[in-house]
Image (cartoon, helix red, strand yellow):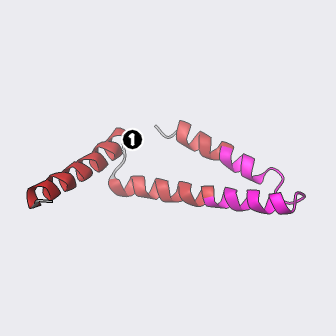
Amino acid sequence: MSDSTQVSQKQSFFSAMRSHTASVGESYFGHMRFALRFAGLLFAAGGAALVHAVLPALFETTASRMIRRMYAMIETRH
């Protein structure tokens, strides 16, 4: 691969990143903060669902409640 092709691909990648963050009205770090928080919530909801699968009396509504909250976060975000 030539140097000019690599430079072009890098520019295209960074352009896509800027375009995406701009389309959701966030800075790079603001978008990172939202995405990391969302990932943490997904992880927690998955953990609650996993525990519930093994011990049904625990976390009966936790995962579904968290998912509804995350859906609301996305819907009201912008």
Percent coordinates x, y for residue 61 in the rendering = 80, 50
What kind of element bears circle 1?
A: loop
Q: Which residues are magenta?
A: 43-67
Q: Is residue 34 above or below residue 76?
A: below
Residue at 34%, 39% (x, y): give it: 23
Q: Where, quadrant-wise, is the N terminus in this rendering?
A: bottom left
Which residue type carries mark 1?
Val
Q: For residue 33, which quarter of the picture?
A: bottom left
Residue 47: x, y in percent?
70, 62
Residue sitting at x 37%, y 58%: 29
Question: Dot 1 corresponds to which residue?
Answer: 24
Residue 46 shown in magenta: yes
For residue 37, above or below residue 16: below
How many tags in the picture?
Answer: 1
Which secondary structure is most common in the magenta stretch? helix
Near-viewer residue (20 or 12): 12
Label 1 crowd bin: few (<14), some (14–19), many (20+), radius 10 Å? few
Nearer-the-camera pick, 47 or 29: 47
Q: Please identify the residue farthest to the right as the structure is shown.
A: 57
